[in-house]
Image (cartoon, grey):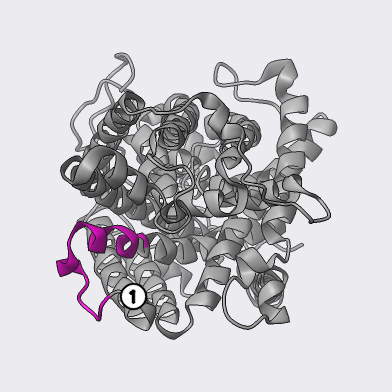
Amino acid sequence: MTGPGPSRPDNGREAAPHDNSHDDASLAELGYKPELKRTLGNFHTFAAGISYISILTGTFQLFYFGIAHGGPAYWWSWPMVFAGQLMVALCFCELAARYPVAGSIYNWAKQLGGPHVGWLGGWMMLTASMVSLSAVALAYQVTLPQISSWFQFIGDGTGKSAAANAVLLGTILVTFTTLVNAFGVKLMARINSAGVAIELIAAVILVLLLAAHITRGPSAVLDTFGLGEGQSLGYFGAFLTASLASAYVMYGFDTASSLGEESKDPARNAPRAILRALIASFLIGGLILLFALLSVPDLHAKELSVDGLQYVVLATLGSTVGLVVLWCVVIAITVCELAVHTAGIRLAFAMARDNNLPAASLLAKVSPRFQTPVLPAVVIGLVAVGILFLNVNQPQIFSVITSIAIIMIYLAYLAVTLPMLVQRLRGHWTPREGKFSLGRFGLPVNFLAVCWGIGMSVNLAWPRAAVYNATGPQHWYLRWGAFLFIGVVGLGGFAYYWFVQRRKTGVLAMHAAVRPDDDIPDSPTPRTP
């Protein structure tokens, strides 16, 4: 919460230290009336961003991949990805200060690149969010059965029984996040903030415990295990593959701004929350990975590239401490899932409010009791569960789709940073006065953000067998799955928008800002190209 300010005029709500009327006026400038309840303070917005990144979830879920493909030297991809994502985050900070609105990626792309770019960016982000919701839910299977065999409800945890059990555990988790999000933002924020506090404390303690068990010097992170020998790009090619383990983790910081309509003083708090979430994740996550490599008893143990950090924790800290840490990982996975679901709901609400989705009036309806859009929570949850069931008999195809979802998020980020760069070059971009601004560094930072986004998107989509056809017989459609899937989702979705939805686009009357001259809500005005 920020410093004291004038009390809010009496409108049936209790007075608050911060004057929300300024935030509501900023929303009205974008054509929307305030409907979501402003209850989130500074820590809540920070928690939303850092829980989406989720230090423990990402590091524990993907450490094995980095080691398997890049050896200990893969650790250097962590600061590399941070540097690139920091450029993106700094651009987002300027946007969060100027446009504190729900569904940040969609609305930012719309304001910078027009309605067509906005819709495509929002569609890519929404699709990726639903797939990501399923992907994070699968992380329960990686951790819970290692805590106790009781959580292996189906089979012995091998083969198809592992996939089936992952779907069961994931469905339970998605059901939980659906109910929490449906019952209102305050309940979501309380659970999320408590979970983030536990995760941060556990992560710091884990860093200290691993540091106390260091058995080798820092030169260990220069070991490549001889990977990449005989390949055309040598170790650089192996490193680019292993870097996906870091690229899969450090995104989602924009969630701090996607709750702009439910936050107090979002123009000030959201930029801070974005940077704090990214920097905290980089520092704590980087130290966990570093000290794990320096403390594991056997750096060449095969379990490192199979069980990952779970093996390091149990082998280094013992079963008792290890189990406590793994329970903290379960909490981290839970709040990460909650944050992903929350961000998807706000994005769907923002697009539906502009009549940019089928059944828009229903999806954009805010529950008068819970003051949150309930239907998007249910629909996104059902789609995520449906995607989960793909994992029962086709786990390899699911892994391909999951990888592609991350690419779509990077592309959605590009739908913001690239039009922003064009606006800067044309001299049309002006940061909000008195709020976060990059000043003269804006152009080079924005340029680097675009270069990074293009380069990492190509790296993520490159048709590697290690990523897109890791097991079983080789299939060209799996190797080229990124281009095929994104082509179908992107081109197919945009074709629907172009031929069906675009002429209906316009703020729905029930959500339009009231014009001060006549106090009559704006009518939905279709936008034509």
Q: What residue does disc 1 label?
A: 162
- Which residue is found at the position 55% from the left and 45% from the top? 246
Q: Quadrant of the C terminus?
A: bottom right
| Magenta stretch, residue numbers | 139-156
**Is 9 located above or below residue 183 in the figure?**
above
**Is 360 located above or below residue 244 in the figure?**
below
Q: Quadrant of the N terminus?
A: top left
**Majority secondary structure of magenta residues:** helix
Amino acid beneath label 1: Ala
**Is 275 located above or below residue 526 in the figure?**
above
- Which residue is found at the position 24% from the left and 64% from the top? 145
Mark 1: secondary structure? helix
Q: Position of residue 88 (x, y in %)?
A: 63, 36
Q: Position of residue 27 (x, y in %)?
A: 48, 39
Q: Does residue 512 show up?
A: no
Q: Residue 408 or 10: which is nearer the viewer? A: 408
